[in-house]
Image (cartoon, grey):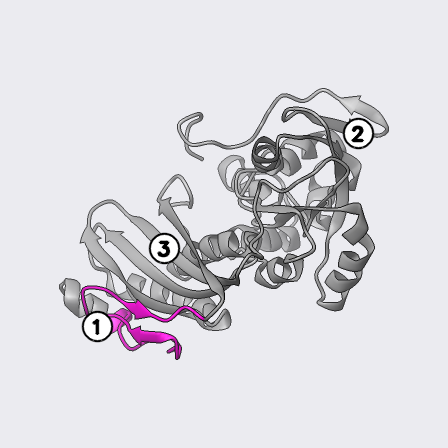
Amino acid sequence: MKEFELINRYFKGRGITRRDVNLGIGDDCALVTVPENCQLAVTTDTLVSGVHFFDDISPRALGHRVLAVNLSDLAAMGAEPTWVSVALTLPNIDVEWLEEFTEGMHEIAEYFNVQIIGGDTTQGPLSITICAKGTIPQGTALRRSGAKVGDWIYVTGPLGDAGLAIEARKQGFDVAPEHLRYINQRFDYPTPRVAAGQVLRGAASAAIDISDGLMADLGHILAMSQVSAHINVDKVPTSDAMRDTLNKTQQLPFILNYGDDYELLFTVPDDNKSMLELKLRQYGVEASCIGQIKSGEGQIELMLDGEKLEYQETGFEHFSKEPV
């Protein structure tokens, strides 16, 4: 099988067809129609074997994962996902692998009403680049730069599970079988918080998805907003798997530094706090208030058991550490 046979078999004519796609796979470019009074949100992520996923990940999970992490970026901006382009680099063509990989990709694309409209295929070490697009009503996008002193800091779900899955695979942590299945699912099949992002439009002041860890991603909001933060670590939500496996001190690097959870971290003005909490509950979105924005220049003050926690690690950043 050669390049265009691969495209025709696994991408062209498969998946959903959106009415706003005027021209999809098969031409030099795709053509789409952006709704009136909307802005186009565009994000691009590359996932590389041995850095963003384990070599032995199932192809179906990988197909899900590569799309999910990009849809999470759209969620963080409050966008509705619409179209994606896929650049796929493969060492060779493995028909069974491709069938499973594309099935995983088409499943999540269909769930979020996203059409794959184009891309590229090349031969080389395994890596996948996704360019995801979405639409946002004009002027309502969530940004990292809007946090103000006094705003409350929230996160949508338990943190550290993906990190626990990584270390369980690398170091063989003793994790109960039912918890091991759960944390592996959290790492291999992350859930982009698309609905939560859209609920936050018009109510949150800033937002980001947690891909590089709480400390690192909160740091991005603080830098862009030119503020500091006070975080009550006791309020950071954790799963039963985390609490049953590690004590409170052992949990710290997982909930503060490990990424790949793809929950949303956002700030809310005090005037919007009660209204947004009610609205989130109405949409079935779990969110925990974990701290507050303070004046300053990017400092993060951590409190644990009522005492100040001295903690230096910041989170993942490419070119700063060995790949996981």
Instruction: Say which label, 1 or 3, has the lower sequence index.
Output: 1
Query: How many other residues sit within 10 Å of disc 3, few (<14), some (14-19) or many (≥20)?
Result: many
- Amino acid at circle 1: Asn
In the image, residue 5 sits, relative to residue 320, either above or below, namely below
Residues in magenta, as a range: 9-35
In the image shown, does 174 or 254 lie closer to the viewer? Answer: 254
- Amino acid at circle 3: Cys
In the image shown, does 82 or 141 lie closer to the viewer? Answer: 141
Question: Residue 131, which numbered label?
Answer: 3
The image shows residue 153 at horizontal and vertical percentages of 72, 42
Query: How many other residues sit within 10 Å of disc 2, few (<14), some (14-19) or many (≥20)?
Result: some
Q: Mark 2 points at which residue?
A: 304
Q: Quadrant of residue 315?
A: top right
Which residue is found at the position 64% from the left and 24% from the top? 297
- Amino acid at circle 2: Leu
Q: Considering the numbered disc 3 on the image, is that residue within a helix, a strand or a loop?
A: strand
Q: Name the residue under label 1.
A: 8
In the image, residue 69 sits, relative to residue 280, either above or below, namely above
Query: How many other residues sit within 10 Å of disc 1, few (<14), some (14-19) or many (≥20)?
Result: few
In the image shown, does 272 or 218 lie closer to the viewer? Answer: 272
Instruction: Say which label, 3 or 2, has the lower sequence index.
Output: 3
Q: Quadrant of residue 16?
A: bottom left
Q: Quadrant of residue 195?
A: bottom right
In the displayed image of the protein, which residue is found farthest to the right? 306
